[in-house]
């Protein structure tokens, strides 16, 4: 019964970490998209200012829309960097557990399971959760 608990616990932990990683990856992509859109809008909003020949910083401070977009851009870049760091940490945590699971697969899976049952478990992890337990990458 100890092996079943271990397999179930490790499977749940792998799935949980994979879902957390995917959630952070999506969040990171959203921040990148919003940053790109905001920078595009900022570029459009300052183009009339640069065409007039008044490209000084004081002119930028007088125009409210470019100033607001610039502030949003700074905040979004900070959020994007912070989210990317968190995503990298989540990916490292997931990969560490996945590789430990691969290394200890013979210890984790019960001995009474046939080769086909073990193969079915590995296939299910690959198909349902996109977690490859066959090879280290």
Image: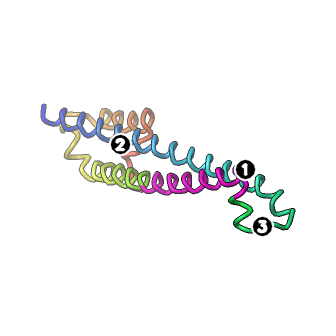
Tell us which disc is closer to us: 1 or 3: 3
Q: Earlier in the sequence, mark 2 or mark 1?
A: 2
| Quadrant location of the N terminus in the rendered image | top left
What residue did someone put label 3 on? 55
Figure check: 108 above or below 81: above
What residue did someone put label 1 on? 41
Q: Nearer the viewer, residue 103 or 41?
A: 41
**What span is colored magenta in the figure?**
62-85
Q: CA distance from mark 2 to mark 1?
A: 36 Å
Residue found at x 21% / y 43%: 108
The image position of residue 36, as x and y in percent, is 66, 51
The image position of residue 93, as x and y in percent, is 33, 52
Q: Nearer the viewer, residue 106 or 1?
A: 1
Residue found at x 40% / y 36%: 123
| Quadrant location of the C terminus in the rendered image | bottom left
Q: Earlier in the sequence, mark 2 or mark 3?
A: 2
Instruction: Classify 10 Å Cα crowding around label 1: few (below 14), some (14-19), many (20 and above).
Output: some
SS type, badge 1 = helix
SS type, badge 3 = loop
Residue 70 shown left or right of residue 1 in the figure? right
Instruction: Classify 10 Å Cα crowding around label 3: few (below 14), some (14-19), many (20 and above).
Output: some
């Amino acid at each position: 019964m100890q092996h079943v608990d271990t397999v179930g616990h490790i499977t749940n932990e792998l799935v949980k970490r994979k879902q957390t990683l995917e959630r952070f990856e999506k969040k990171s992509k959203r921040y990148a998209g919003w940053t790109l859109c905001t920078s595009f809008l900022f570029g459009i909003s300052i183009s009339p200012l640069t065409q007039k020949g008044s490209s000084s910083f004081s002119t930028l401070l007088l125009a409210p829309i470019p100033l607001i977009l610039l502030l949003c851009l700074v905040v979004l870049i900070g959020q994007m960097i912070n989210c990317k760091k968190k995503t990298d940490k989540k990916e490292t945590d997931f990969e560490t557990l996945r590789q430990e699971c691969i290394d200890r697969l013979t210890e984790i899976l019960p001995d009474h399971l046939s080769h086909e049952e073990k193969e079915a478990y590995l296939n299910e992890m690959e198909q349902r959760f996109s977690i490859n337990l066959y090879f280290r990458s």
